[in-house]
Image (spheres, rainbow, N blue to C red):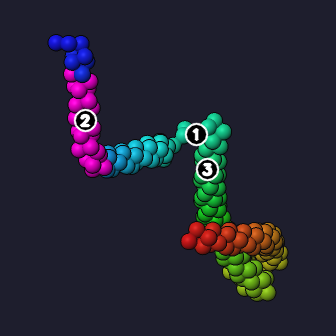
Amino acid sequence: MKPKSKLAAILLAIISSAALLSASAAQERPKQPSQSKPSATRSAQKATAEKSATEKSAAEPDEKIEAEPAPPTNEELMRKSLDDLSTQINQLTTEVKRLRHDNERNSDAMQLLLYEERLAKVEEQTQNALDYKLQLDAREADLQRRSRNIQQEVILRGGLRRDEVEAAVRADLQRALDDVHNQQNQYQQRIADLQAQATRLRAKVEALRKKVERTEESNQ
């Protein structure tokens, strides 16, 4: 084969290849839009998924922060301890006041019982003294009656010398009257002392009774 013929064959082959490539490109060019559209959709979906993942990852730390609060500081712990201590002190103070109040009430009630018992004894002693004073008054009246009827006393006693018997009777009656008068004075003073003591005890008992009643009313 001649060189020119060989060169022409090569050029023809190149031209033919170029024509085939152009035809193939022309056939493939209309199909590109349909392929680019799904690619764009996938890109949009991927972007939306990445955005959702980013928002979710951004929201997760907040949820973790809410679920796990920060540990309290030393100042907060100290303030809480002081508040707890203050509450305990207030409770103890209230309990101490209640115990003191109960002790005072019990003490007042005990004192009331003691004073009532003492008053009862004093009143009993006063009544006994009054009764004995009445007996002394009756004895005094009897001795005075016998002194006025001395002659009858002389007759009842008898004796040889009437004047000596009468003198003896008068002396005996006078000694008895003097003894009665002394006892009357003593018991009159004792009655006065007992009555004054009873008056003081009644006032004390009345004051304690009112105090105990007020305490019981306040407890109710």
The correct choice, above or below, for 123 with respect to 44 in the image is below
Few, some or many residues within 10 Å of mark 1 (<14, 14–19, 20+): few
Residue at 55% across, 38% down: 71
Residue type at mark 3 is Thr
| Rendering coords of residue 142 (x, y %) | 72, 82
The Cα–Cα distance between marks 1 and 2, rounded to whole angstroms, is 82 Å
| Rendering coords of residue 15 (x, y %) | 26, 30
Q: Is residue 24 visible?
A: yes
In front: label 2 or label 3 = 2
Task: Please give the label number shown on residue 72.
Answer: 1
Q: Which of the two residues, 97 or 164, is positioned nearer the viewer here?
A: 97
Task: Please give the label number shown on residue 87.
Answer: 3
The correct choice, above or below, for 35 with respect to 123 in the image is above
Residue type at mark 1 is Pro
User: Tag 2's secondary structure?
Assistant: helix
| Rendering coords of residue 62 (x, y %) | 49, 46
Q: Which residue is mark 2?
A: 19
Which comes sooner in the sequence, label 1 or label 2?
2
In this picture, residue 23 sits left or right of residue 75: left
Residue type at mark 2 is Ala
In this picture, residue 157 sits left or right of residue 13: right
| Rendering coords of residue 96 (x, y %) | 63, 52
Location of residue 18 (image quadrant): top left
Residue at 66% across, 39% down: 75
User: Tag 1's secondary structure?
Assistant: loop
Magenta residues, as a range? 9-34
Q: Which of the two residues, 28 or 9, is positioned nearer the viewer here?
A: 9
The correct choice, above or below, for 109 with respect to 72 in the image is below
Few, some or many residues within 10 Å of mark 2 (<14, 14–19, 20+): few
The Cα–Cα distance between marks 2 and 3, rounded to whole angstroms, is 100 Å
